[in-house]
Image: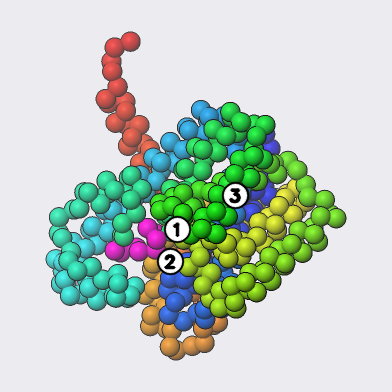
Amino acid sequence: MQRDLYIDFAKGLATISIIFIHTAFWSGQFYIPTEVRVFSLVFDVALFYALSGITSGNNIEKTLYRLLKLQITYMIFVTFLFFLDYFFKVYGLNFFSFEWLKDFYSTFGTKYVPSSISSEPQWQVLGNWYLHEYSNCDTFPVVMGSFWYLKVYYILTVLGVLILKFFPKHINWFIGLCVILTLIFNIFPHYYPNGQGGYVAFYMAVFLIGNRMKGKKISTKMIPVLYGLVAVALAWMFWNYGSDIFYKINKQKFPPKIPYIIWTLFSLVTLFVFYNRLKITKPNFITNVGQNAIFFYFAQGMSSSLIYFLVVPLKDSMSWWLLVLIIYPLNILLAFLISIGLKKVDDLGWKVLEFLREKTASKNP
């Protein structure tokens, strides 16, 4: 099949948008105005779930194989991250001091300063990372702070392919069920479940709507109607919750509540409006980002942590907008370079696993 470059392009733009969000909400808390940080959430992770729905099918074996490969790639990455974090701490303890390390980590903010640092590897931390318990990585705090997306992605993809396989004629009913559950959780907050329940209810609806849009094109007449509905929803949000809700959008994201859901509607409508309408004919940097989105996602957590060490000394010496124009492109460049290195680490990890498989395989025919 011919690759749809629009999907890669949209995924690439969404990835670059995530880099801006993490630029704004992590190191950006020191200098970027709240209004700008809130607007950065216009193009957020909901786009990834919609794109996943568009590209998903009902082949269970193929889907589970793809998830298995992703899990192994993830485990290779967190193993690399674990040893990178560990060796940095050992280096700091042996050549400097515990106080030096505390001062280093204080760059991220006082809550990220560890109370104690062991020279022994904490293997239980690595085991928890393997099982998607995202305890903080001291040296790269943004990495684990952005990994909540991955756990929800696994759940959605498994449940989604089961729905597509066994209930292909009832997808609209499942979309309605997800919408009703999301409304119930928001109207009766004491019923809002802990864990992943709230995330799955909303993002599963996005995933299934994306799947229903596969191969389709929104008519020109419907475009102003859809954007009009988004405008009405936004007006209702401010009327019902008050103007202060604008500054609380990020707090409405974990898990997704009505104000954040309304905030995402513009980006979702825009994605579907341009789907099968905007033709991307040649590969470019953005499509390359989209094709390697998982490595960029891993890399941006590391790059968004590293830029703290430039932001902190510069935040008081220039205007915030000028600093953004320096830091954001630099973050993209760092993520790009780190992603190249992570792909090489991933290739090496797969080669090691293949070597171990060959050495431990049974010799019996």
- The kind of secondary structure element at disc 2 is helix
The residue carrying pointer 1 sits among few (fewer than 14), some (14 to 19) or many (20 or more) residues within 10 Å by Cα, namely few
Position of residue 270 in the picture relative to residue 163 (left or right): right
Residue flagged by tag 3: what amino acid is it? Ile
Q: What range is drawn magenta here? A: 138-145
Q: CA distance from mark 1 to mark 3?
A: 16 Å
Kindly identify which numbered label has been placed on residue 180.
3
Determine contact: label 3, label 2, CB under 8 Å: no
Say which label, 1 or 3, has the lower sequence index: 3
Residue 30: x, y in percent? 43, 80
Determine the residue positioned at 44% across, 77% down. Answer: 29
Q: Is residue 195 left or right of residue 217?
A: left
Give yes or no for residue 140 being in the magenta stretch.
yes
Question: Which residue of the protein is positioned furthest toward the bottom in this rendering?
Answer: 317
Instruction: Indicate whether 203 appears above or below 316.
Output: above
Give amino acid for label 2: Ser
Any part of residue 17 in sight: no
Q: What crowding class fits label 3: few (fewer than 14 Cα within 10 Å), some (14-19), or many (20 or more)?
A: some
| Residue 252, numbered circle | none
Q: CA distance from mark 1 to mark 2?
A: 35 Å
Residue identifier under label 2: 304
